[in-house]
Structure formats: structure tokens, C-alpha cells
Amino acid sequence: MLTFILEGQIVTPIVTRKTEFYMERCKAIIKHPRRRYYNKINASKPMYPYSFQCYLGAIELHFRCSNTAKLKQKLKDLLQIKAIGRFHSEGMGLVQWIKGNIHSNYEPTHTKNTRTLRIRKGLPHNLTKDIKKLLWYALLHDFVNTPKHKSKIYIEPNLDGIAYLRNHHDKTEDSFIQLFQKYDHLAAMITRKIRSPRTNRYNWSSNSNIDFEKLATQIKEVASNIWKLYDYIYQSKELEQLNESLQHGHTSLRNHLLVIVNLIVHDFQRNEL
Amino acid sequence: MSKKLSDRVKRIQNPQRILKVVAYTAIAKPLNGSLPRSNNSHFLRLYPIKYSYRNGKEEKEAFSISYLLKGIRGAIRHQVMKTCYDAGVEVCHTSDKATDKAGNSLLPKGFHLSGSCKGNGECIVHQVFGSMGTEGLISVYAEPITAISHKSAKTEVKVQKVHIATENRVCMTFDNKPVQDFGERYFSGEFTFEIDVTRCTSEQIGLLIESVINMQRLGRGYNAGYGRVQIKRFQLLERTIKRIPEWQEDNFIVKEELNEISLKNEVLEAMEAWNAYVYT
């Protein structure tokens, strides 16, 4: 089987969500991608501007065929391509072809399969004492007043041992807090994608008001048992309406807490903690 | 149903008909939007471009960031609408909404809703520019702009050398320092853009020429005195592009051949065809 690779340079950004896609029976790969956002304003309508994700970089087209004559005919056809993707009438997606080659035994380099994080319905039973403590702190760390921010449900539930968490944003030499901070930052990095500032704790998807006092008491009731606490957070519709960060209005506090706990459990089960 | 990416591929049609326009602006802001964690509005940023220049006897190298010139197609469309309005031809408006939430009319006199004329009696603006779900006939492109002040600068890539800077628009100060700065990037100088009119009829080309000659606006801030454009010259070209692979065993390099012929008579024919369209 012969493989033909055509290489080129993207002149103006291609409007696409992915850097790998199929077109014209070829696999297209954008190498060294640089993400851009193409904004469109329709001044005649009272509406928010549209934003489209697009990429700059080098582009490669891979085409596989057994016949060399067909391969060269396909090359002639592909060289006629001027623009790829949406808004080519506005000058977007222009491509300049540079060079190419034919391989007789080409093996494509597969990207490494990254581990996917699955959100568990419940916590496993075989947990050690240290992990239980870490998970308990992870589930409750955002309900505590800290020097950086107040409790994210506005009211701090009165619990024994929760005062230890008030310094979880500080730079300390405490290995326990350092370990917790690692997972907190990792979970925040995963969940924070779109920056959209808010002035209160309700995120963009919230529809109703929340009784924060009731929420604090309910958390306090289940806080003694981490399995019950995890289950409460998993099923909570109130925590889903709150944002994790005021700068990111599309995140939810529930997802953030669940992601931290699942990252810890995931690493614990693989002995990588 | 939205089209797949594989269906959104544009090929070269030989011979192409290109309307090449040279324009000048003192200050214009065809901006893309603000960057994250910034109040300033920017152009759509492309690659940093490498260039070489002479400093006395020395040859030096430097980089300059290039930007995309946005919004030319929209500016042409607005001018085309104005030309049609002046000529008494009812055409599509840019919006497909008749009223806003409060019930105020959004549709001015002399226009109909965008895309409402599909099928029988399609207006000339809908034919040329299309609407939601209907592809237009033209495509507009301008070479990226960059700010290179060296006169002896040479670049490997085609760029347009203009002046680019930031206008500070300080909204609030504290202790003589800006707290909120809604600054905007602008460019000034001569620039060129091209309209691909290969698929247009002569009356449509005539309308585009008539509109481009009278084009006045580009980018934001027109009411504050920004974005005024003077058209210096234009040309209708017939362009043929040939891309040929030069083989060296299993590898090849793509070479591009470009030929351009000026079409003087077609310009006059197109203008006459547009006048005939208006008076019939």
C-alpha cells in the first residue's frame, strides 16, 4: 500500500474544532497548531458576537492507495485546493502547498492513549486511613473561609478539624497540603476552560435561588461519613448551580469536587499516589 | 444541517477574474476582539514574519507580527446595499429579524429581510453575497498587514507594510495610572484587497465596481472619525494559476505559475450592464 503525503502552510486560520480531520478521502493533520478565535459581529441584530475556534500552523494531507497512477491523479486534484473550512469567502482557511512525498511502507505514528477519567457513582470500600483523610479534606476544602476567598456556599459548616484547611492556598512545607494542592490545581486546570467572569457564585446555567443555610446544615449532617458525603455531592443539584471560580462562570462546584476525588482515587488504585 | 468540513473546500477555477483594489486609510480599526485578561481590542494575529534589512553595511534580521485585515467583505456589502438603495432597487438587508424584543422595527425602508427573496425574484445582493444556508458568489482576500519601518526590508512571504499602533482609551485612573484601559489597535497606510468575481455576471461585476469606487467605511468607530477609506485605483484582472509538482524520485516540490491579464473593456461592459439593470 502506497501512502502519499502533501505538506503545506496555513496562510490564514482554518475554522475547525479539531486539529485532525478527514476531507476529500484524506486525513488532514494540523502540525504545530496555534489556536486563534475568529469573532463575528452582526451589527444589524441586537446579539452577542459569535466566536469560532480556528488554527494556524503546518498542514499535512495523508492519502493511501495501491495504484501509483491514481495517486498522481489525486495529487493533481488536491493541488487545486485553495481554501479549507468555513468563511473562505472572507479570506479564511487559505492554504499554500509546498512539498510532498510517496512512501511505500508508511506507518503512521499513533498518539499515546491518555487515561480517561471516569466519575464514579460511589467511593470504593478499600480505602486507607490517610486516603480517607485526604478525600475528606478534598470534599470539604471549598466550604471553608480562607484568606483568599470566603466559603463558596457563603456559610462555613462547623466541623471538627476543618480549621486545618483554612491555609490550603498558602505555600507550606506540609507534605499533606502540598499533595492536596497538586490535585486541586490539576482539577481546576481540567474544569476551567472558558473564561466568563461572574459577580456572584451562581453560574450561567443556574435557574433558581439556593438556600445556603440549609445547604450548610445538610453538608454538616453527612460530613462524618465520606461515602455519604460523596454521594450527597454527586446527587446535589444546588452545588451544580454554583461556580468553582468567579472568573469562570461555566464551571460547577460539584464537578470540581468530584474531579479532585476521582483523580485521587484513580491514582490510589494504581499505586501512583 | 450544517455542512461537513470536507464539503467546505474551495478549489482554484482557471481562469479567475479578480477585482484588485488599492485603498488608503488615515486610521482604521477592523478589529477581531479582545484577548483573554485584557480590555484592549486587537487584530486577528497571524504569524511572526522574518525579514532582513540593511543597517549601514551590515545585513540584519528581525521579526514582525502579521495581522489579518478583517471585515472588508462586510464593508463592501454595506456599500452595495447603499448603491442599490440610491438606484431604487429593493435588496436584502443584513438581518433576518423584523423586530427586536420590544417590538421596534429593525428593517429600514427599501429593503426586505435577508434570505426572504430565495427562489423566484432573487435580488442581486442575495445572488452575490448569499445568506444563511446559501453560498455567495464572491470571496474577498487581503494580504496580511505588518508594521515594518525599515525601507530596505525584504520578506519571503507576501505582506503589506503599514503603520500599526495602539490607541489608549483610559476609562478610569488612580494615582495617575490607568485602572481600565479599553485601548484599540489601529492601522494606517495604503493597502490592497482582491475580490474574486469569477462566478459573477457582468451586471453583478458592474454593481461591485460601482460600490467599491464609492466605498467609504472600514472597521469600527466611523461616527468618531475612524475608518474612512479612499479608493485610489482598481483593476479587473484575468488570472491563471498553475500548480505543478516537480518530481525528484519519490519527493516533489510544488511550483506555482501565475499569469495576469488586464481586462479594460470588460470593466466598461460591466458598468453598462449595471446601468441597464437599473433602468429596466
Image: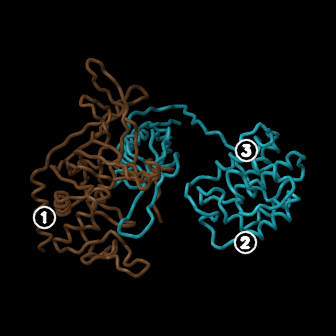
> In the structure shown, which secondary structural element does the residue marked by tag 2 occupy?
loop
- Disc 2 marks which residue? A211
In the displayed image of the protein, which residue is found farthest to the top? B57
Disc 3 and disc 1 in contact, CB within 8 angstroms: no
Mark 3 lies on residue: A181
Q: Colour of chain A?
A: cyan
Q: Horizontally, is A150 left or right of A195 in the view?
A: right
- Identify the chain of the residue marked 3, using the numbered disc in the image: A
**At 71% from the left edge and 48% from the top edge, which residue is drawn?**
A184
Q: Nearer the viewer, residue B165 or B210?
A: B165
The structure residue drawn at horizontal position 71% and vertical position 68%, both measured from the top left corner, is: A238
Between marks 2 and 3 in the image, the one whose residue lies nearer the viewer: 2
- The amino acid sitting under disc 3 is Gln
Q: CA distance from mark 2 to mark 3?
A: 29 Å
Cα separation, mark 3 vs mark 1, equals 72 Å
Which tint was used for chain B?
brown
Rendered location of residue B203, percent (x, y): 17, 63
Residue B171 placement: quadrant? bottom left
Residue B273's disc is 1
